[in-house]
Image: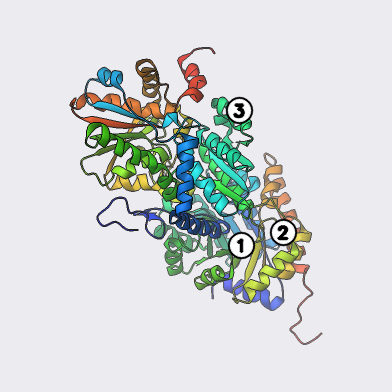
Amino acid sequence: MTIANSLRSGPDLTGHFGAYGGRFVAETLMPLILELEAAYEASKKDPEFQAELDDLLKHYVGRESPLYFAERLTKHFGGAKIYLKREDLNHTGAHKINNCLGQILLARRMGKTRIIAETGAGQHGVATATVAARFGYPCTVYMGEVDTQRQKPNVFRMHLLGAEVRPVTSGSRTLKDAMNEALRDWVANVSDTFYIIGSAAGPHPYPAMVRDFQTVIGKEARAQMLEREGRLPDLVIACVGGGSNAIGMFHPFLDDANVEIHGVEAAGDGVDTPRHAATLSKGSPGVLHGARSYLLQDSDGQIDEAHSISAGLDYPGVGPEHSWLKDNGRVKYHSVTDRQALEAFQLLSKLEGIIPALETAHAIAHVGRVAGQMRPDQTIAICLSGRGDKDIFSVADALGAKL
Amino acid sequence: MSRLAAKFAELKKEGRSAFIPFISAGDPNMEICAAILDALPGCGADIIELGMPFSDPMADGPAVQMSSTRAIAAGATMPRVIELVRKFRKKDNKTPIVLMGYFNPIHAYGTAKFARDVAAAGVDGLIAVDLPIEEDEVLRLPAAAQGVDLVRFVTPTTDAARLGRILEAASGYLYYVSVAGVTGTKSFTEADVAAAIARVRAATTLPVAVGFGIKTPEQAATIARLADGVVVGSAIVTKIAETLGQNPEVVVKAVTDLCTSLAQATHAARPAKVETGFA
């Protein structure tokens, strides 16, 4: 459905957000992607599908998630009132489950019998393994070998949930290579396999579908802010790797002209060093993993390796809708270094008793730069996309602590 | 008549199927690759598919992935890939060259400039693995303006309606993917490929080449009896991997020995066609 004068009407019928998006996949996969698109469109019009999803979100995930006023963090930064949208309190500890439930219901509807997924930090892998267990499907999760090392607790959780974790040793052995490998699996198992993509990336219809399943975050946050403050927030913030929590948080606010929106990318060692993952800030448009979007690439079109202390942001691409939102200026994209994220990780833990995911810590660090510039009667809503239990080993390592 | 059309006309007259080897441009390095390229027509290559290396070849199995990685490490940038073709063309003006790869390096080079430069270098066709018909106009139109064919894929997942749409703007030849999967992993079954080729032939007069999973001379012969072209890639780049670090002559010989046996099997697969009236 097209909404007149709306920033929420994309993508177009061919899956493009302006110049971005599309379906850049091997011919073998095209019929599957078209079949998926048809099944997804049908599910949107099916009240039973929506009712089942809503029921699972309430009773299995624990939605709605709270919007928490972070009083001590607000006082610390000394400016706008800071609210945290607590996606970390969802079952499995992050926003990823919202999308996985939607996609596994689609898989069942399409008669698929096997689930595959890619994962970076492991949160999407855990969420996928969780829903696969809940619905009784065999599940294979591709994870870069580097990420299996730095996210060991999540690898073990996936094993407990009955999933097979296949470490990926090609390329940079991180999220992008895991996605390549999942696509290779899919093309070889086209008849029975459903690929649950966790980022708002990949070929159409994935970016739109993942976004739609994640907009529950922004819809709730918008209503909760109206209830708590009687008005919309002045600023909405989320971290951006592939961009699923961010697009889910942002999308319901896109047409609210008075709400400023900031996405926060991972700057690694710094955006002016070769080691970062700030795709929108420092990349250029190209085609990877099925879509045209901003990429980190060299002048010859070879994909650069991204770097971030946070495995979930360590990706050289970004969802196509974010590329479009960057170009049209609706969302401002900023970046935060590993060091700043580590400080924010500890700050939120100590001030609020909430250990955030390292991904989320990037958003917290950015709040530290902007909250103090704002008035005390203004408000900020941050998507607290996940909890940080999975990160304690890498944080300990970075801080030189022995566990 | 284009080099590709002339080649398929010649093969049809002779009643042969084309042997189409694939190598990655710059594998294992630019020099040895140039030597392999120069030697391929002599060992029976009718058409050459030259891979444009890409860091993230998501439709390829491990053999071609590693080949692509070696080529990038050896400095195989797009200008050097095109230069490789230009040099080959100075010595061989007959063997069609088809560049095969992924869209991003083409996009980074500039699609219009790419079409002009490859045409000027003597490239006859292009295969872009991640440009399905929904997205291929961006390359197909500038290529066509330069007289370069964009080869389209037909796969085991292509139904009749989609085949019709693929054929609407197909040119050069059709690339039939023998198995749903990545390159060099699964093996095809003869009956499946025969049925698929029959389906395609009923819908078009374009030549049909078959690739993915053809490794041995026996498999090449089986495909040669069914199709107009036999594409072998992973088995060939595996020879390069096995001879890494050895003298250039050893690498070239390993590749040409394999290609000779594959070409012979391809060419001998069908009984000689007699058109002279002397039989």
Q: Are marks 1 and 2 in contact (CB under 8 Å)?
A: no
**B23 or A229: nearer the viewer:** A229
Residue under numbered circle 1: B155
How busy is the neighbourhood of tag 3: few (under 14 within 10 Å), some, or many (20 plus)?
some
Give percent across and percent down for residue A268. Answer: 41, 28
State the CA–CA distance, disc 3 to disc 1: 38 Å
State the CA–CA distance, disc 2 to disc 3: 37 Å
Give percent across and percent down for residue B162. Answer: 54, 68
Count of marks overlaid on the render = 3
Residue at (50%, 73%) from the top-left corner? B168
Type of amino acid under label 1 = Thr
From this view, report whether residue A255 is shown above or below residue A126.
below
Pointer 3 chain:
A
Mark nearer the viewer, 2 or 3: 3
Q: Which secondary structure lies at badge 1?
A: loop
Residue under numbered circle 2: B188
**B255 or B162: nearer the viewer:** B162
Q: Are marks 2 and 3 in contact (CB under 8 Å)?
A: no
In which quadrant of the rendered image does the N terminus of chain B lie? bottom right
Give percent across and percent down for residue B95. Answer: 61, 65
Q: Quadrant of residue B17?
A: bottom right
Residue at (54%, 52%) from the top-left corner? B52
Drawn side of residue B200 relative to residue B133, left or right: right
Pointer 1 chain:
B
Pointer 2 chain:
B
How busy is the neighbourhood of tag 1: few (under 14 within 10 Å), some, or many (20 plus)?
many
Residue under numbered circle 3: A156
**B81 or A73: nearer the viewer:** A73
Give percent across and percent down for residue B87. Answer: 54, 57
